[in-house]
Image (spheres, rainbow, N blue to C red):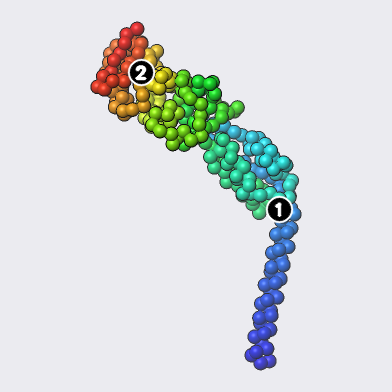
C-alpha cells in the first residue's frame, strides 16, 4: 500500500471516528433534554442574625408564576437556567441568584438576600425597608427586621433619590443610618429617627430623652460632642434627668431638664 493511499485511509478513519463521536454526543444531549427535572434544591443564605426574609415556597412560587409551570417533572430542555436566575434577581428580597443543573437533572438554586438596614414609615404611611445599597424593599411576611426606624415628615420613595441634590430626606436618612451602624456604641443606642421640618430627632433605646440632631451636616462632630456628653454628664446625673439633648449648634450640647 503506497503512502498516498495510507494517508487517505487514515484521514477517512479519523473523520469516521469524529462523526461517530458527534452523533453520540448529539444523541446524549437530545436524550438529556428529553429527561425530566428530578428535584429542586434551594439554598437561601441567611442574614447575619440567621433569619430569612423569604423561604423555599416563595422561590418556587415566583418561578411558577413566571414560567407558568413547576420545575419538578418538567423536561430539562425547556428549563432556561439563565431565565430562572433573572426571575429570582428581579425579586425585591434577592440580591443575587446562582442556578445550575447537575448531571442527575437536579436544579440547584442559591439565593443571597438583600439586607435591610432601615425601616421607613413615610408621611403617606407607606411602610418599607432600605437595604445596605439604599434599595427599597417591602416588608417580609416571615420576619420583621430589628433595624433603625424612621418616621415623620418623610417624602415618598423615589427610584432615583440617591442621585438627588443634597438635602433629600431619604438620602440623608440612608447615610445617617450607615454612620450609626458603623459605630457599635450608636448602633446599640439609637432605635428611631423622627423627621420634622427637614431636621432629625434621634430617639435612644435607653432613657426617655430626645436628641435634637438637626440637619444632616457636621455629623461626625455632632456625634462626638453627644458621646462626650453621655460619657461625662449623663454618667453623673443619670439617664432620666434630661428631656431633650440638643447638638444642633457648633461647640455646644444643651441638656434641658424635665
Q: Nearer the viewer, residue 137 or 96?
A: 137
Q: Which label is found at residue 77?
A: 1
Task: Quadrant for the C terminus, please.
Answer: top left
x, y percentage for residue 52? 56, 32
Q: Which label is found at residue 212?
A: 2
Quarter of the image holding residue 93? top right
Left or right relative to 27: residue 97? left
Q: Is residue 105 above or below residue 158?
A: below
x, y percentage for residue 2? 66, 92
Residue 84 in view (yes/no): yes
Q: Which mark sits nearer the N-terminus, 2 or 1?
A: 1
- How many C-alpha atoms fall within 10 Å of the one at disc 1: few (<14), some, or many (≥20)? some
Quarter of the image holding residue 96? top right
Left or right relative to 114: residue 258? left
At horizontal 29% and vertical 11% (from top left) the residue drawn is: 237
Q: Nearer the viewer, residue 46 or 124?
A: 124
Disc nearest the viewer among 2 and 1: 2
Amino acid at each position: 500500500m503506497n503512502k498516498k493511499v495510507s494517508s487517505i485511509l487514515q484521514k477517512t478513519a479519523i473523520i469516521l471516528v469524529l462523526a461517530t463521536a458527534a452523533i453520540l454526543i448529539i444523541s446524549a444531549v437530545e436524550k438529556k433534554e428529553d429527561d425530566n427535572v428530578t428535584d429542586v434544591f434551594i439554598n437561601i443564605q441567611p442574614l447575619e442574625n440567621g433569619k430569612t426574609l423569604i423561604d423555599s415556597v416563595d422561590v418556587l412560587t415566583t418561578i411558577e408564576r413566571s414560567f407558568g409551570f413547576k420545575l419538578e417533572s418538567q423536561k430539562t430542555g425547556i428549563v432556561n437556567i439563565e431565565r430562572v436566575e433573572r426571575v429570582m434577581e428581579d425579586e425585591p428580597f434577592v440580591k443575587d441568584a446562582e442556578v445550575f443543573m447537575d448531571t442527575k437533572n437536579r436544579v440547584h438554586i442559591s439565593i443571597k438576600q438583600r439586607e435591610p438596614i432601615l425601616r421607613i414609615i413615610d408621611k403617606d404611611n407607606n411602610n418599607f425597608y432600605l437595604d445596605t445599597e439604599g434599595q427599597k424593599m417591602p416588608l417580609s411576611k416571615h420576619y420583621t427586621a430589628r433595624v433603625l426606624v424612621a418616621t415623620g415628615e418623610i417624602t415618598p420613595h423615589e427610584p432615583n433619590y440617591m442621585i438627588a441634590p443634597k438635602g433629600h430626606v431619604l438620602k440623608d436618612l440612608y447615610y445617617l443610618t450607615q454612620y450609626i451602624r458603623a459605630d457599635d456604641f450608636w448602633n446599640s443606642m439609637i432605635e428611631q429617627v423622627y423627621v420634622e421640618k427637614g431636621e432629625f430627632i434621634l430617639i435612644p433605646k435607653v432613657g426617655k430623652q430626645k436628641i435634637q440632631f438637626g440637619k444632616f451636616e457636621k455629623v461626625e462632630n455632632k456625634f462626638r460632642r453627644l458621646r462626650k456628653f453621655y460619657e461625662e454628664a449623663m454618667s453623673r446625673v443619670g439617664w432620666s434627668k434630661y428631656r431633650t439633648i440638643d447638638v444642633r449648634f457648633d461647640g455646644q450640647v444643651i441638656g434641658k431638664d424635665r
